[in-house]
Image (tube, helix red, strand yellow):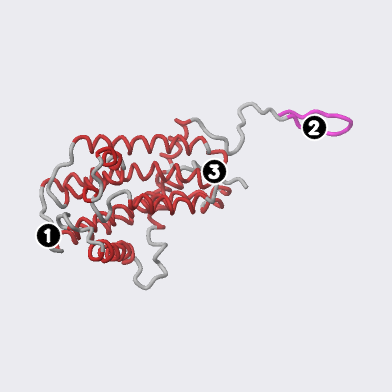
Amino acid sequence: MSVERAAGQQLAVVQLQGLHPVGRRPALRDYVSQLWTRRHFIVADSRARVTSGTRQMVLGNVWLVLNPMLNGLVFLVIFGLVLKSSRGIENFIGYLLIGVFMFQFTARCLSAGASSVTSGRNLIRSFLFPRAALPIAAVLRETLSMVPVVVSMVVLVLVIPPHAVVTWRWVLFPLVFALQVVFNTGIALLAARMVARVPDLNLVIGFVTRFWLYGSGVFFSFDAFVSHPTVLAVVELNPLFLVLDMTRDVLLYGQTPDLRSWAVLGAWAAGALLVGFLFFWRGEETYGRE
């Protein structure tokens, strides 16, 4: 910066080399590096918000487990007892519990991720940080909340007749769960940018999730209702159907999921994360604007 005199006044000449607009999207490598340096903020924010939704309730954290259990009870009465969708399904109660608990995990991640940018608008306007930290923190928060839910699910399938039997295949469950977390992160990033651009899509996500619920075999088996091989092949490409099917195999039925299931679910997880992250990063400059 230099100072020049003009008509008795001092004019400051500012050199703009090396200056960048605030909030401009950084290069992808720099963006990932910034996210990594703020990992402690992401973890701390997630841990602080785990119980925020139930803090004012009498039962507190018990609702983390009680909510999916009550949903499972509703599905058990309607589909298991009234509509008899349990016919032909071995250990239907365990089948239903795994379906409800694991599906709701993805549904909560999608919902929390979708609203993460809009609900964090004040934070975005006050601090400079990679905005992807918000949907990632939302997924991490739901993952931490899922820990007691998973423990309860495992206990229930062990103690409710017909009892599940512990086999070595149980060690495969964390791998299935990890792929689900990666997939959830990808769709949360996708939804976060779309809802930040068009807030009305937050309502649409609820309808999509409900349709996804019925299309994932949460409380019935497609084999009992669908015989067309093409339709069944399409159903088996559904990532949440794969998560539920593989979890039931390893925890309920003592079976090892086939290699195709691992490959398809792995492709969904990696693809969703890659596409979701790039899609969110490209909108970095738009978040927090009116």
In this figure, which residue is indicated by the disc labeled 2?
11
Which is in the foreground here, disc 1 or disc 3?
Answer: 1
Residue type (three-letter) at the residue carrying disc 2: Leu
In the image, what residue occupies the spot 35% across and 68% down? 60
Picture coordinates of residue 262, whole percent (x, y)? 23, 37
> Which residues are drawn in magenta?
1-13
Choose top left, top right, bottom left or bottom right for residue 37.
top left
In the image, what residue occupies the spot 34% across and 42% down? 183
- Left or right? Give the position of 141 relative to 193: left
Total marks placed: 3
Residue type (three-letter) at the residue carrying disc 1: His
In this figure, which residue is indicated by the disc labeled 1?
163
Q: Secondary structure at mark 3?
A: loop
Residue type (three-letter) at the residue carrying disc 3: Leu
Q: Residues within 10 Å of mark 1 (few under 14, many from 20)?
A: some
Residue 171 magenta? no
In this figure, which residue is indicated by the disc labeled 3?
128
